[in-house]
Image (cartoon, rainbow, N blue to C red):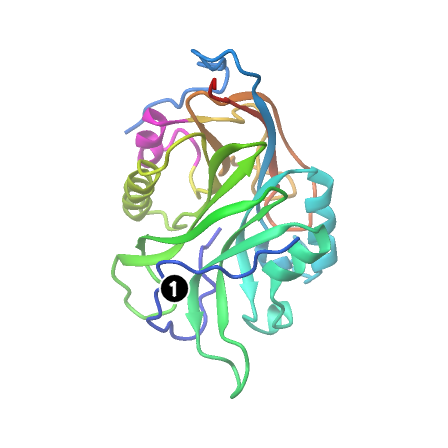
Amino acid sequence: MPQGPGRPTRTARVAAVLLAALLSLTATPATAAEDATPSGSGAPAVPLRVATYNIHAGAGEDQVFDLDRTAAALRDLRADVIGLQEVDVHWGERSDFTDEARALAEKLRMRVFFAPIYDLDPAAEGGERRQYGVAVLSRHPVLHAENHEITRLSTQTPDPVPAPAPGFAEIVISVKGVRTHVYSTHLDYRADPSIRAAQVDDMLGILADGRGPGVLVGDFNAEPSAPELAPLWHTLRDAAPDAGLTYPAIAPQKRIDLITVSDGITVTGARTHATDASDHRPVVADLRLPREDR
């Protein structure tokens, strides 16, 4: 699915850190069953349910904007943390200029961090800035949030060239005392895999700075066996290899929406959720986070 709306010119506002709203190659990826039991720790593991969903700016497979339908699909997942992609914040008429990140957080009574990929001037004088990007919803306290840059090919300028741009979201949450890094991403949609390969390299560099359990979710616009994703599987594991296909939402043909986890995290179950609230299906996984002995 295309990563950008493909509308007006992009402004050059790049934020290293943006807190929006905190509310109350060919390698075969390793599967979650491998290395499933955390080693060297007798402390009880901590449960966490994680999901990912490309919400298609709140429009369903029928192209009708209905954020209540989006919220209902998310609520059905009963997830503790949800990575979102294709999120509009005052973007345009297609989503009624809604701040979708804040609205969904309020409907679900979750905290939210929004990480814009594009940040454009208001549509009218005195209006809100027009933004589009990814987000993370959380039921757990958010200790830190950051909007990282990765390589992108803009959809907002003619003849774009690869360049660093924001829109790779990271939050650090406290899950019963376990500091956990959760990342939400949306990789390039083009047939040429070179931009995705650069994005994978960029993400791995950012993940390397994290300490403790890490979960990377998102719309990768490539299946797990794609050569450009192969470097991921040296560091992460595919948490839902048997959960089902995700795109398109009706009669899906590909699995491009992924949940991946770092070593030491146990996956006890994973599934896709059949809904036409977007053109993608959401994926949800039940995890157990390792707790260090004290």
Residue 224 lies in the magenta stretch: yes
* Residue where numbered disc 1 is placed: 155
Residue 264's image quarter? Answer: top left
Q: How many marks?
A: 1
Residue in view at x 54 percent, y 27 percent: 240
Q: Nearer the viewer, residue 181 or 43?
A: 43
Residue in view at x 32 percent, y 71 percent: 12
Locate residue 117 relative to residue 91 in the image: left or right. Answer: left
Tag 1 secondary structure? loop
Query: Farthest bottom residue?
Result: 125
Q: Nearer the viewer, residue 190 or 195?
A: 195
Placement of 165 over or under 277, stated as above or below: below
Q: Position of residue 273 (x, y in %)?
A: 67, 36
Residue 269 lies in the magenta stretch: no
Can you see residue 234? yes
Q: Position of residue 7 (x, y in %)?
A: 45, 71
Locate residue 275 relative to residue 282 in the image: left or right. Answer: right
Placement of 15 over or under 216, stated as above or below: below
The region drawn magenta spans 223-236
Few, some or many C-alpha atoms within 10 Å of disc 1 (few <14, some 14-19, many ≥20)? Answer: some
Q: Give the residue type at disc 1.
A: Thr
Residue 18's image quarter? Answer: bottom left
Placement of 182 over or under 65, stated as above or below: above
Q: Nearer the viewer, residue 147 or 203?
A: 147
Can you see residue 243? no
Q: Position of residue 97 (x, y in %)?
A: 61, 72
Residue in view at x 70 percent, y 38 percent: 78
